[in-house]
Amino acid sequence: MRIGIIELNAPFCQAGLAGYSDRAMRLVARRRGCPYAVTEALLDVILLSGGQGLKKSIDINDEDHPVAGQIIGSEPQTMSRAARILEQHGYDVIDLNFACPVKKIKNKARGGHMLRDVERGIAIMRAVRSVLKPQTPITLSLRRSFDDSSESRDMLYQILDEAWQLGFSAARVHGRTVEQKYTGQADWSSLIGLKRQYPDRIILGSGDVFNAEDAVRMKRQTGVDLVWIARGAIGNPWIFRDAIRLMQGKTIQPPTVHEQRDALVEHFDLAMQIHGESIAGRRMRKMGIKYARFHPHAAEVKKDFIQVSSLTDWTSVLQRWYDTDAPGVWPAPDAADETREDSACAIPEPS
């Protein structure tokens, strides 16, 4: 499996999610089988404004490859300059986010609104391609259409046809429309149609992949080349290992309590290295809540993680609940989980 010159050893990808998928989350997953990861969407004008905090957030290291830097914006000039910044920082792939159902900013299209402003979207694609090295793979993140009209579906194909003509390496398509936002079910049949339309192109599928079984089912049912795992990867870095095992016809077991502990320790340590203790404490509180789902006493562990704000708090929870090894449990389906599957929506606007 390849995305341009980038070779992958399994057909799965950790998606970008605002406030979650930083380098710490990516590295913990990579050490457990994740073959490819994408950053949360980075607003082009914020990338261009620079700053020490931004530099820390976009820096990658030798272990964090292959990785795609995902950008979102509304102007060809700023999007192309932002793409160049990420290329210079060593990102293996540049991904253009035309998927998020964000609000229009000053009447300009951004994210999924490109599916209604095709001329602007194509201008951005051409501008980005023109400034990057010929060998740098560019990918496109989309939704299946802006709405359910036939005109909207035609616009999707206009954008994809232009992407292939420009030499884009792959496209990720989410099975919801932009108008759906995060409600309803993802339509996997649209992914089947895309692979029939573009059998020789690399298509990543996303939407409603909550566990390893879902990832394998999407791969087999739709024929997409890679499965983009978003919400299902939060607090579950084992999902990639498990999906690979299922593809091989092997059985899977939930992570033991000590396997969970090891991932939690790693994750907090990496988060502190990147963000410092204060920010890491805030970020890891919500991560710990997700990890807690695998613990035999999930409800009590979750309650304790909600109180975490420092390394001391974190260590206390681990000592209380993770010292003694035991079999883990599979999380119950969480119908109330509204974690956003796309990553741009939580990005602050520049002042």
Image (tube, helix red, strand yellow):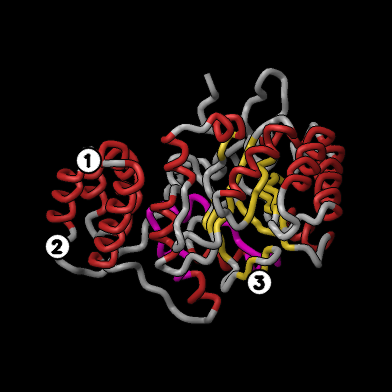
Q: Of circles 3 and 1, which is in front?
A: 3
Which stretch is magenta? 219-242
Mark 1 nearby-residue class (10 Å; few <14, some 14–19, many ≥20): many
Q: The N terminus is located in which quarter?
A: bottom right
Calculate the distance from the C-alpha at mark 2 to the C-alpha at mark 3. 40 Å
From this viewpoint, which residue is outermost toward the bottom?
A: 249
**Which residue corresponds to mark 1?**
308
Q: Is residue 175 visible?
A: no
Quick one: label 2 or label 3, which is nearer the N terminus?
A: 3
Q: x and y percent of residue 14 in the render?
A: 52, 57
Q: Is residue 238 left or right of residue 124?
A: left
Badge 2 vs badge 1, beta-carbon distance below 8 Å: no
Kind of residue indicated by mark 1:
Val
Q: x and y percent of residue 13 in the render?
A: 56, 60
**Which residue corresponds to mark 3?**
1
The total of numbered circles placed on residues is 3
Check disc 2 and report its element: helix, strand or loop: loop
Calculate the distance from the C-alpha at mark 2 to the C-alpha at mark 1. 18 Å
Q: Is residue 266 left or right of residue 323?
A: right
Mark 3 nearby-residue class (10 Å; few <14, some 14–19, many ≥20): few
**Which residue corresponds to mark 2?**
323
Quick one: label 3 or label 1, which is nearer the N terminus?
A: 3
Q: Is residue 84 left or right of residue 329?
A: right
